[in-house]
Amino acid sequence: MTPPKKARTTPPYELLYWPGIPGRGEFIRLVFEATGTPYTDVASSKKDGINEVLACKAETLTVDSDGNPPAFAPPALRIPGEGKGGKSLVLYQTPSILSYLGDKLGLAGEDEAEKHWVLSHALTALDLNNETHDTHHPIATGKYYEDQKEEALKKAADFRENRIPKYLGFFERVLKGNEKHGEGKYLVGGKLSYADTTLFHVVNGLKFAFPKEMEARESEFPILLSTFYPNVEGHGGLKEYLASDRRQPYSMGIFRHYPELDRQ
Amino acid sequence: MTPPKKARTTPPYELLYWPGIPGRGEFIRLVFEATGTPYTDVASSKKDGINEVLACKAETLTVDSDGNPPAFAPPALRIPGEGKGGKSLVLYQTPSILSYLGDKLGLAGEDEAEKHWVLSHALTALDLNNETHDTHHPIATGKYYEDQKEEALKKAADFRENRIPKYLGFFERVLKGNEKHGEGKYLVGGKLSYADTTLFHVVNGLKFAFPKEMEARESEFPILLSTFYPNVEGHGGLKEYLASDRRQPYSMGIFRHYPELDRQ
């Protein structure tokens, strides 16, 4: 039997994230998919895998049996053999996991400056991701949307009118400033980074959650929406993944389509 | 004349941040102060320094004359001589700047695992920082508190009842799990990291913004509030800085004391 490509040179990466939604786990999945790196999505591929997700964030956990701290929240990444004394390493926080994998999988820029720009741009895209979530949960994460709908209508209006153009305008300028190297296709340098995959997913989610708003603004951000976005979408391993049923549909996670929150 | 300690071995670090508030710039200042590293706080120490802060985030900027991308928002860090081709390097996003300086100044853990845990914990403390900000601005960053006070009362109640104990309980467990190495004084390993200085500042800000809530919860998080917090406060360079007038008072920034948002 032929092992899958790269299987002999990468450790057995295990993603610990909720099943059934793209969520923040999707930012991690995209770097694996873009590089053709094998990984296990524990909750969706192992029987009782959800229990392993719950265990890494258990409110009684102080340190695990391999010496890792608890995770505040999923996603976490577990890498057997890469921790202290050859045990499993467990990392949490999306940007920290992306920074780790970016270094290992060649998605973190070419030098120290680019490495930090990639992290900075990814953090900014993740801030936009978080603000998108807060449009339907402006008061309390633990309460239903229906219980904070009135506030959500106000928050979403500000988000559409002020925050979306501020963020997308910023990334349009970053792409413009890097055009000599990136030709509008990459935020940093001349090749794909995890900043690109992260921004791509956030824009994809915005198109799902706010279709009218995004359509109305299509022409305002031509490099971002007409060059960058389709380029990442068509990139090597991503194209096949995005069209597959492994790419989970949006539902009740970060990106939700409530027509009343969109442009009217 | 004797140059200040470390002046010969560190580049001329320049912090680009708003004057007059601790803000997110404070997380950067603390790593300089904790390590006795000279730096220039551009807006408060140079005539027209504020213009340099505004320039790095100007909404017309695509790339600066040294090849750096624009900043989405302050803080930014400028380091003459450390950029491409010996030009200035400009980084933005607090966690990215902390990760860069942590590596350079010895505040980022002892190995690859610790380095990522330090980043992860700092990111979590910064998430708490952001949620604190949102208690007084739940609807729109660009509007006055008074225009979203009704929503702020709801948001702050959820924050006090659910989010503060969730975050502080998490850090209490991390400190407990690292007690063998850190003795309750450090989140990761046996020495100070930028995760410690970052968490310290957020707890300090919470004590200012929600004094009654924090006092009522004092005994719930004994390692965090009675060992960790006073230890960072009394740490080498920080002790003197925190007592000096260079430590700016809280005012209309992230941490604000609105008595009506505190425990009644």
Image (cartoon, coloured by chain):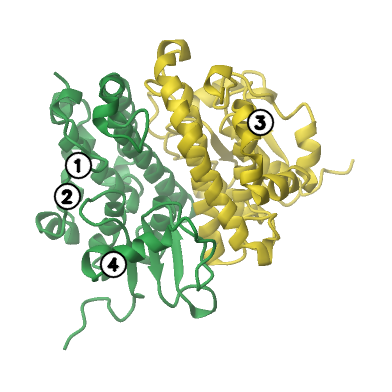
Chain colours: A green, B yellow
**Element carrying mark 1:** helix
Nearer to us of marks 2 and 4 is 4
Q: Mark 3 points at which residue?
A: B41
Q: Residue at x 37, y 60 (%)?
A: A54
Viewer-nearest residue: B204 or B224: B224
Q: Which residue is drawn at 63% across and 49% down?
A: B196
Q: Name the residue under label 2.
A: A233
| Mark closest to the chain's N terminus, 4 or 1 | 4
Q: Same chain for labels 1 and 3? Say yes or no.
A: no
Q: In this view, does B16 lie to the left or right of A240?
A: right
Image spot of residue A7 (x, y percent): 27, 78
Q: Name the residue under label 1.
A: A204
Determine whether B255 is above or below A52 in the image: above
Q: To which chain does the residue with label 3 belong?
A: B
Image spot of residue B68 (x, y percent): 45, 39
Q: What residue type is labelled 4?
A: Gly
Quadrant placement of the C terminus of chain A = top left
Q: To which chain does the residue with label 4 belong?
A: A
Image spot of residue B242 (x, y percent): 75, 35
Mark-to-mark CA distance, 4 and 3: 49 Å
